Amino acid sequence: MKSQVNEAKEALRELFPATPLQLNEHLSARYGAHIYLKREDLTPVRSYKIRGAFNFLRKVVAAGETDKVFVCASAGNHAQGFAFVCRHFGVQGVVFMPVTTPQQKIDKTRMFGGDFITIKLVGDFFDQCYQAARDYVERMDGYMVPPFDHADIIEGQATVGAEIMEQLPEGEVIDAVIMPVGGGGLSAGVSGYLSGILPKDAFLFCEPAGAPSLKTSLEAGKVVTLDRVDNFVDGAAVARIGELNFERLSGFSPEQVLLLEENAICVTITEMLNLEGVVLEPAGALSLAALEKLGRPALEGKTIVAVVSGGNFDFERLPDVKERAMRYSGLKKYFILRLPQRPGALKDFLTLLGEEDDIARFEYLKKSARNFGSILLGIETKRPENFPPLFAAFDAAGIGYQDITENDILANLII
């Protein structure tokens, strides 16, 4: 396998130089470790997906079968990598995307593929889109280029591991490699390439808590299709890990799969943007969010490689990401208050706020037939420890309140 991966790695240099393996000073200081970031957000399409698509098409083109149409179904990074590679080889490609795909992703895919790409918008959901793509391949006798569940795709993603070993400074010994998992192409490829070089327990895999397809499958001992998936981490929100990918990952323990809360990932995105100027998509932030989950005691003195899988972030999502990050960090909370309907009640309430507390949302519905009115209140503060004194002030003033910050149903309806 290693010789084939190395061959694929050398062939990739037609498209772009090796992505950097960077020692991150900020994270290294925080955890007392050597934290290296493998920057897959710096490929031409800002994700590692271009590697697998290139390797797949490279082999088909070498076999002389360029007269067929190539097809993929994707609303994200796979589509963009596929489009770039089709243009590189001068072959025709068709990208199937759901009708609900954001225009930004459609435009970027079209930009990368140029005249070599046709985009078809089909269905409201990915499953409908994927089925349409499969039907098209059968009808046109084309080539389906899968996002992860294929040996050539896995081999292409494994070039990440080959580059890591090539770039690691002399004398450094890796204690852990942390990788995000969606369909499993990256994790199967990199762990396969590094097997025999690193011990089995040196691999840690990260999934969003709302899409634990690998962990659930490892626990069951077989591939499991999740009943529901939280799509917030769209690059890794996969309901079913690939069959071949799971086969190659089945020897790992479920304990080696870390589940990261979606809001914790938002903290990582905002910190890396504000402190490092690095733009990460939610899936690209998974391995860095895992560092915080592991904590300094587990990482201190070690050499860690975290794979940053992608940076295709839609900045229209930034307000939501910031909101989630503040709530997770305990800096923002939402309440339903009951205030007496009398003159001066609101003024009395405002005196209870601390110097670092700020009202971020205030909605008051006065009902003349009642003695009390309800308020939806959002409060931001500088430090999470400011909230307990505020709660005590509410209680002392006899103000009835309900903290709805973690109530997902209410939050989705009114926040």
Image (cartoon, rainbow, N blue to C red):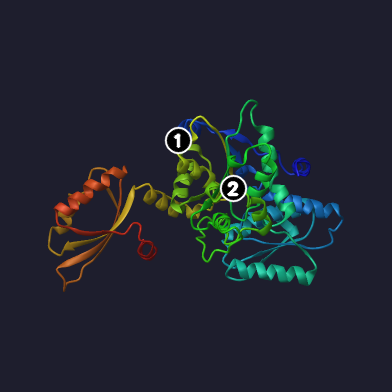
Can you tell which of label 1 and label 2 is closer to the viewer? 1
Q: Is residue 27 above or below residue 186?
A: above
Closer to the chain start, of discs 1 and 2, is 1
Q: Is residue 97 above or below residue 295?
A: below
Quadrant of residue 161 within the rendered picture: top right
Seen in the image, is 376 located left or right of residue 132?
left
Q: Position of residue 325 (x, y in %)?
A: 41, 49
Q: Position of residue 168 (x, y in %)?
A: 64, 31
Residue under label 2, please give it.
310
Quadrant of residue 412 within the rendered picture: bottom left
Seen in the image, is 399 located left or right of residue 22?
left
Residue under label 1, please give it.
296
Name the one closer to the observer, 267 or 256.
256
Q: Residue furthest right?
A: 64
Quadrant of the image containing the N terminus = top right
Query: CA gap, disc 1 to disc 2?
Result: 25 Å
Q: Which mark is residue 254?
A: none
Q: Position of residue 138 (x, y in %)?
A: 76, 70
The amino acid marked with disc number 2 is: Gly
Q: Residue at x 57, y 35 (%)?
A: 175
The reply to whether residue 233 is in sight is: yes
Q: Secondary structure at mark 1?
A: helix
Name the one closer to the observer, 375 or 60.
60
The amino acid marked with disc number 1 is: Arg
